[in-house]
Image (cartoon, helix red, strand yellow):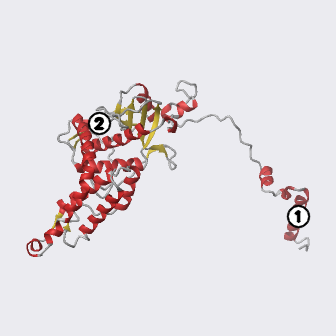
Amino acid sequence: MISSELLERTAAALVAYRGDGRGDVLFDGRDPGNYGNYHWDFTFSMLMRNDPTGLAAGMLLNEMIEATIAGSKVKLSRVLREAGFLDRLGEVLRIKNELYPEIEGPMNKLIEHVDVALEQTGSKGGATTREVALCLRDAIHSIDSGMSLRWLQCDDVAAPGDGRGKATHSTLALNIGHYADTAAFADALRHGLPFGAHLARIGHGSTSIGIKQPGRIAFLSTLALSTISGGVEENRSGSNLAEKLDLDNMVEHYPAWTEKGQFNGDRLVPAAPGQGHRLVSLSMLPRDVVIWTAMITEIASQRMASAKPGEVELAENLRIAIGVSDNDEGALPSRLLPAVVKPNWRIEELTLTAGIRDLALGWIGSDDFLRRRRMACVLTCSCLWGTTTWR
């Protein structure tokens, strides 16, 4: 556990050190490796709410310190001639030295886990601290903003772990599955896919991540019923203008399912005309997508291990919940769910008389009211034709 007091103190000290960009240290606002600290309060609150250990916030602060060191500029005249200037510049190292020992151990273990995933995909080189820190932040943001964990099975058995209550890392499966809908992916997780974490393309371009452990199966998805279109859509958030590893803006690193071609490193090689979807392996994805997927898997695995069966609500697709089979006569296919279900109840037919009764305006329908109304109509017509002077 990294204390929130240390994290808040480090963040305040870093803000004071950077100043407004016109003090001892100068920054180039066009430098993509640096940051403007625009959303720190929101980001810090979101990270601490979802990761009480403080590791995600600590790793992000460490990268902000590194960006400050790498992206700063100073005037040589001040370095050579101003007394105490070098000591003030060295304050950033004192800030780092207070934070780094607290995050070093768990950060290195996390990087080792990511390195295994990158090695499986054939990616060259291990993960950098910046890649892991920012993809961890972005993964937490994705889960916080709608990528929910939905359970398919949670047996009352000991959760897989290392004997200390920690969840075993779920190994990323190399192959990427393509399923018509979430129900088909859920069935594959239950009955066909091996243990591990599975990245899947759902339908035309939606994303889901399934995790299968002994006795426990769940998947993550942002698919939800849209109140605008009435259909099932993927709910994504995040900046579309941000860089892949942006210190200021959180990014959702979903695979680009609808782009044709495959990735060579981080460069998309276009497919020949007429070729279809080619993202069938993690090795075809850019590094940031692989690391983001590994971070989401790690977070979900930890939550799955700590969950208690009595507190878990299983997610069933509508076809199973209402007992509709694709073979049933007149039944809708599962890909068109939600299905139309014949109701076993009947609503009372609305009539004018019933509406007046419910409004307590029964006097309108009385015989006396109708007689007076007819008389008024007759007299009005007589007035128009000049046959009476009734007022």
Seen as rendered, the residue at the extreme front is: 164
Q: Amino acid at mark 1?
A: Val
Could you tell me residue 242's position as x and y percent? 30, 55
Q: Is residue 374 left or right of residue 242?
A: right
Nearer to us in this view, 38 or 376 = 38
Q: Position of residue 43 (x, y in %)?
A: 36, 57
State how many labels appear. 2
Q: Nearer the viewer, mark 1 or mark 2?
A: 2
Q: Position of residue 391 (x, y in %)?
A: 89, 74
Mark before the other along the chain sequence, 1 or 2: 2
For residue 102, above or below residue 372: above
What residue did someone put label 2 on? 279
Say what secondary structure mark 1 lies in.
Answer: helix
Tell me if residue 361 comes above or below residue 292 in the rendering.
Answer: below
Q: Residue at x 39, y 31 (%)?
A: 212
Residue tagged 1: 378
